[in-house]
Amino acid sequence: MLVTGTDTEVGKTVVTAAITAAAQAAGLRVAVVKPGQTGTATGEPGDVDTVTRLAAPLTGRTLASFPEPLAPLAAARIAELPPLELYAAVDAVREETDKHDLVLVEGAGGLLVPMGLRPSGEPWTVADLAVSLGCPAVVVARAGLGTLNHTALTLEALERRAVPAGVVIGAWPAEPELVHWANLTDLVPHLLGALPAGAGGMDPGVFRRSAPGWLTPSLYGVLDDWRAWAEEIS
């Protein structure tokens, strides 16, 4: 399953951790694969490290890391490092599917960010990776202004590639405003979950116990009534 987003910093990593926690609570063996990690020059933990801290997947792998906080292909070029090759990423993910019940592949930035190069020398994106793997996608979206357009564009791009997809709100505010409720109403037909803002800062034990309540059964959670959820939140 690909976890992508409408943009960068929308909560992909924490959503990946939540799906991991919910799936493992349901008894699945989960692997998390990050094809391209950028911004490693700061020395801060990478996305797989964050998922491991919050959800402790059975396996966590980063296939390529680059120092600059850029799109992976640009970061490889700036660092004069070999770019990630599409079919090397495909093979690495498929290797994990032989040993796990669920493999989550976390993208970088949005759906069409250049990730690396094909053998032909042409750039590839996480959308191409999803097509090559034949896997569904989870689109992580913002709750606020602008999200409807960005989400619709991402879902349309996936639909044109015949990639099934649903949406998870990456950070639902503690004090939602009119725009958040209006967006929720429009997104509900596509929604597979919604995480509270600040979920990534929770104690890992609390995070793991809470994660199933943020996700619908399609993502191994227990959230099955958006009206009841909205009434409880409000």
Image: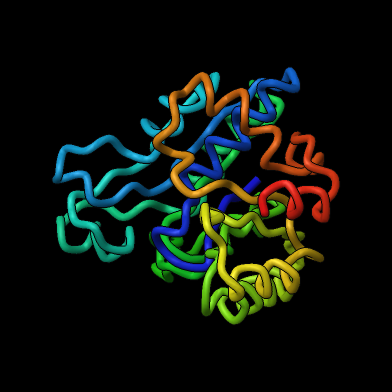
Side (left or right) of 229 relative to 100: right
Residue 158 at x, y = what percent? Answer: 68, 69
* Residue at 28% from the left image edge and 51% from the top image edge: 38
Residue 78 in view, yes or no: yes
Residue 115 in view, yes or no: no
The scheme the figure's colours follow is: rainbow
Q: Which of 118/218 is in front?
A: 218
User: Residue 140's image quarter?
Assistant: bottom right
Residue 223 at x, y = what percent? Answer: 78, 41
Residue 61 at x, y = what percent? Answer: 43, 31
Q: Which quadrant of the rendered structure holds the N terminus?
A: top right
* Residue at 67% from the left image edge and 54% from the top image edge: 234
Side (left or right) of 159 relative to 171: right
Position of residue 188 relative to residue 221, above or below, is below
* Residue at 56% from the left image edge and 62% from the top image edge: 176
Q: Which of 93/108 is in front?
A: 108
* Residue at 46% from the left image edge and 59% from the top image edge: 10
Side (left or right) of 176 relative to 156: left
Side (left or right) of 96 relative to 167: left
Position of residue 47 relative to residue 189, above or below, is above
Q: Which of 184/44 is in front?
A: 184
Residue 148 at x, y = what percent? Answer: 62, 77
Give the number of marks. Answer: 0
